[in-house]
Image (cartoon, rainbow, N blue to C red):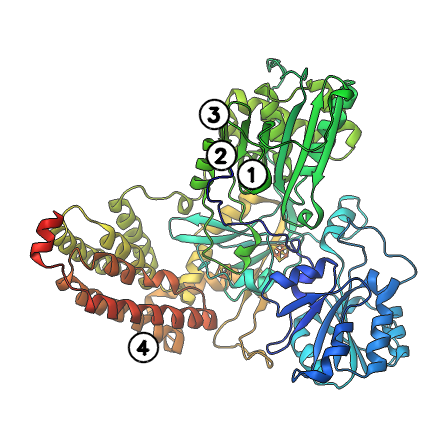
């Protein structure tokens, strides 16, 4: 398996959803930062102008030696609260003594986060850190928090500024211009720790969740950039890739709401709807499988994403084997990977302990690869353990993007190639694929159920050499979410026997129409014509269909059998026509589809809050110059209804919104596109067909709202200019060559 070229996509460790580092490690444009070996070291492989790291306690110290010999005037240094307490304070003291221009960014996240949320040693609090740093002689201490209002009056010593994290950029600009050593104390609790404490009822759990109106979403990726959050996930729809919030992993940090678009809504009050069908199944008649034998050591390689319970699966299997008196070893390969990286657990089980001479599964020796994440299972560590005739692979094919997706909205998840690699690594018929995450989440209401579901599936296939009783007893001894883990295991068993039944129970029958992809060109056109009728009227839809029909006739005449250009125009001419102006956004909130989706996801007494930046009343951010979003209560739905009814004003003298520069530009884009296609059609031939399709697809890259759209437009126009030049320069092959080629 290793001799083939590897898939280049990697699951690189990354900050957790809602992690304070997602925001705290940002630096203003033109600045640089350094790291230590805490979680913030991961900023090095993000777009955070952060490079180099030191051992704990020396954060920022190399700058003392570098500062006199460089033109760089200032440096930021990240430092964790635990490190601060045991040794980092000495680094700060050294920086004060050397009088270098440095700002220590101390994250007070209230836990030793990287190693699993142990308490920080010693008495420590934001007030004490601020006071101690001031006493060390730093020039300035500024506190930044997600909840600045939480501090009682007089909590901090006088002279210490307190700001909301929304002002981080401005605060950092001030600090970098302050000579000497300064402190930015960023106070926000570790997201993983919050999740743990919330489960135990020891931390407030706000009844507030974020949802995205997928039809309003433009797929621009700005929410990923702003939040750096891996819970902002892709959803593939008829109208392109949009965003959704993975409610299972979301830690309620709300940074994604800053994504510059009107798609974000917070659902306040109520709770996530519990799946109804999960309790209804009867598992009593599941036939007992014949389990695999352990007369020889039996190796199970569990692969998955850090933070989703891969290590727990290894531990459960280990405990179950121990309960049966078998020999067992469990070896986890995790480290930093426990933060969204590729985690692998080697489980080896034998009848007797003395049969096990190594804890690691040797190359080609895995009897079962329990691939809870397909991407991890094509990595080096997992691929090396597969062998034809030896290994059976059970693979979860769920689309769970690696964290690079936060910054690369077009990242591809090559599911087909990955499946092919695994099929090729084992004997024909020995690899089985299923979207376990979608099934388990649909059944249990939380994607954390996935891995136990996979164990149940493998068990029913006879691939786990243990009894159900010992596995379930291990679940009980583990003590966490016992009933739901048992239920997930049983659903997995049932899925192996009756996949259709489980699929029907897991997937809602009334899936949103936009998530059903068209299967023919005619359908692509018809659905968009219908959409445009709702957008404006039948005449507007006819403008669309007539233009597409003209392209189709030309393409058929010049290149019989080809439809790629027509398809591109059917999709992207539509995209340009369906401008998401104020009337349209209002329509997409009030046509019933959005509220239906929210009601399918939430129950109880909830209210909707909208996060918008209305163009006529917006005040730009004084530091960045970008428009700012504000929150609007449920009354906004009424305003949307009025606005949606006013769509007839669109394009008339009474269209106040239509006079903004953004709307004028969007209308100009339609006219430009029509003329561009008019130029392409008469010259269309086999020699320039691909270029024509690429040109017609350019609007795919013009995404987002306001300044985000402007940025994308600039890049798209540069690409378009290149393609136009190439199209104009392309010449048909000489007739004789064409004959030879034919
Ligand atoms: S429009 Fe952009 S910022 Fe808004 S939800 Fe979609 S991808 Fe995120
Ligand atoms: S609210 Fe948004 S930013 Fe916060 S954890 Fe959830 S998805 Fe991530």
- Residue found 83% across the figure and 71% down from its top: 91
Give the number of callouts.
Answer: 4
Q: Earlier in the sequence, mark 2 or mark 4?
A: 2
Name the residue beneath numbered marker 4: 653
Name the residue beneath numbered marker 1: 377
Name the residue beneath numbered marker 2: 422
Please tell me whether mark 2 sits on a helix, a strand or a loop.
helix
Indicate the quadrant of ligand 2 in the picture. bottom right
**Crowding near pointer 4: few (<14 within 10 Å), some, many (20+)?**
few
Query: In this picture, is 387 found above or below 18?
Result: above
Percent position of residue 704, x then y: 45, 65
Q: Nearer the viewer, residue 76 or 474?
A: 76
Percent position of residue 176, x then y: 70, 81
Q: Nearer the viewer, residue 82 or 110?
A: 82
Alpha-carbon span between mark 4 and mark 3: 69 Å
**Residue 132 appears in view:** yes
Q: Earlier in the sequence, mark 3 or mark 2?
A: 2
Q: Earlier in the sequence, mark 3 or mark 1?
A: 1
Depth check, mark 1 against mark 4: the one in front is: 1
The answer to whether residue 670 is left or right of residue 295 is left
Give the quarter of the image for residue 494. Answer: top right
Please tell me whether mark 4 sits on a helix, a strand or a loop.
loop
**Residue 280 appears in view:** no
- Residue found 25% across the figure and 69% down from its top: 724
The answer to whether the residues at label 1 and label 2 have Cβ atoms under 8 Å apart is yes
Q: Earlier in the sequence, mark 1 or mark 4?
A: 1
Name the residue beneath numbered marker 3: 427
Q: Earlier in the sequence, mark 4 or mark 3?
A: 3
Alpha-carbon span between mark 1 and mark 2: 8 Å
Percent position of residue 205, x then y: 73, 51
């Amino acid at each position: 398996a290793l001799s083939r070229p590897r898939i280049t996509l990697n699951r690189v460790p990354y900050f957790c959803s809602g992690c304070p580092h997602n925001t705290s490690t940002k630096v203003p444009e033109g600045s640089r930062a350094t790291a230590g070996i805490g979680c913030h070291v991961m900023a090095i492989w993000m777009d955070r102008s952060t490079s180099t790291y030191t051992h704990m306690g020396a954060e920022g110290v190399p700058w003392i030696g570098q500062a006199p010999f460089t033109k760089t005037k200032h440096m930021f240094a990240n430092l964790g609260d635990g490190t601060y307490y045991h040794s980092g304070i000495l680094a700060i003291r050294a920086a004060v003594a050397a009088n270098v221009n440095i700002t220590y960014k101390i994250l007070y996240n209230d836990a030793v986060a990287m190693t699993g949320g142990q308490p920080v040693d010693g008495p420590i609090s934001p007030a004490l850190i601020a006071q101690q740093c001031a006493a060390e002689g730093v020039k300035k201490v500024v506190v930044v928090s997600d909840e600045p209002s939480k501090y009682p009056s007089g909590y901090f010593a006088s002279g210490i500024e307190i700001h909301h994290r929304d002002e981080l950029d401005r605060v950092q600009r001030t600090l970098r211009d302050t000579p000497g050593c300064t402190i930015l104390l960023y106070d926000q609790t570790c997201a993983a720790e919050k999740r743990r404490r919330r489960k135990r009822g020891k931390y407030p759990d706000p009844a507030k969740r974020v949802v995205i109106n997928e039809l309003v979403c433009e797929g621009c990726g700005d929410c990923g950039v702003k939040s750096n959050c891996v819970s902002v996930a892709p959803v593939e729809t008829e109208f392109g890739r949009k965003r959704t919030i993975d409610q299972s992993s979301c830690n309620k940090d709300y940074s994604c709401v800053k994504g510059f678009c009107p798609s974000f809504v917070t659902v306040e009050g109520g709770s996530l709807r519990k799946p109804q069908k999960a309790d209804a199944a009867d598992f009593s008649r599941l036939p007992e499988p014949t389990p695999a034998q352990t007369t020889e050591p039996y190796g199970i390689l569990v692969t998955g994403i850090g933070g989703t319970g891969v290590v727990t699966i290894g531990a459960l299997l280990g405990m179950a084997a121990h309960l049966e008196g078998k020999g067992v070893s469990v070896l986890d390969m995790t480290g930093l990977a426990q933060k969204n990286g590729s985690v692998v657990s080697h489980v080896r089980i034998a009848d007797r302990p003395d049969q096990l001479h190594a804890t690691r599964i040797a190359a080609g020796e895995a009897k079962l690869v329990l691939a809870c994440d397909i991407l991890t299972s094509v990595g080096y560590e997992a691929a090396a353990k597969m062998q034809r005739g030896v290994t059976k692979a059970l693979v979860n094919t769920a689309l769970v993007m690696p964290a690079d997706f936060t910054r690369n909205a077009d990242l591809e998840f090559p599911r087909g190639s990955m499946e092919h690699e695994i099929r090729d690594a084992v004997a024909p018929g020995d690899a089985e694929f299923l979207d376990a995450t979608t099934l388990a989440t649909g059944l249990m209401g939380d994607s954390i159920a996935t891995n136990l579901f996979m164990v149940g599936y493998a068990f029913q296939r006879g691939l786990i050499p243990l009894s159900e009783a010992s596995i379930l007893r291990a679940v009980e001894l583990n003590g966490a979410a016992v009933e739901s883990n048992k239920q997930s295991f049983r659903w997995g068993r049932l899925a192996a026997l009756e996949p259709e039944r489980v699929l029907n129970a897991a997937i809602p029958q009334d899936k949103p129409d936009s998530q059903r992809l068209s299967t023919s060109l005619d359908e692509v056109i018809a659905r968009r014509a219908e959409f445009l009728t709702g957008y404006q009227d039948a005449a507007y839809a006819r403008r669309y269909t007539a233009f597409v029909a003209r392209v189709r006739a030309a393409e058929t005449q010049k290149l019989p059998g080809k439809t790629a250009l027509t398809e591109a125009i059917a999709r992207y001419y539509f995209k340009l026509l369906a401008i998401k102006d104020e009337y349209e956004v209002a329509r997409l909130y009030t046509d019933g589809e959005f509220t239906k989706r929210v009601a399918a996801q939430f129950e109880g007494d909830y209210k909707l809050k909208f996060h918008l930046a209305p163009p006529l009343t917006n005040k730009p951010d004084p530091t960045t110059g970008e428009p700012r979003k504000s929150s609007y209560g449920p009354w906004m739905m009424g305003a949307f209804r009025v606005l949606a009814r006013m769509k007839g004003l669109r394009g008339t003298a009474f269209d106040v919104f239509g006079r903004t520069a953004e709307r004028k530009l969007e209308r100009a884009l339609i006219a430009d596109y029509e003329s561009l296609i008019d130029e392409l059609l008469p010259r269309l031939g086999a020699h320039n067909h691909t270029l024509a399709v690429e040109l017609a697809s350019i609007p795919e890259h013009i995404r987002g709202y306001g300044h985000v759209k402007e940025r994308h437009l600039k890049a798209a126009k540069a690409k378009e200019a290149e393609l136009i030049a190439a199209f104009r320069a392309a010449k048909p092959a000489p007739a004789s060559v064409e004959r030879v080629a034919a």
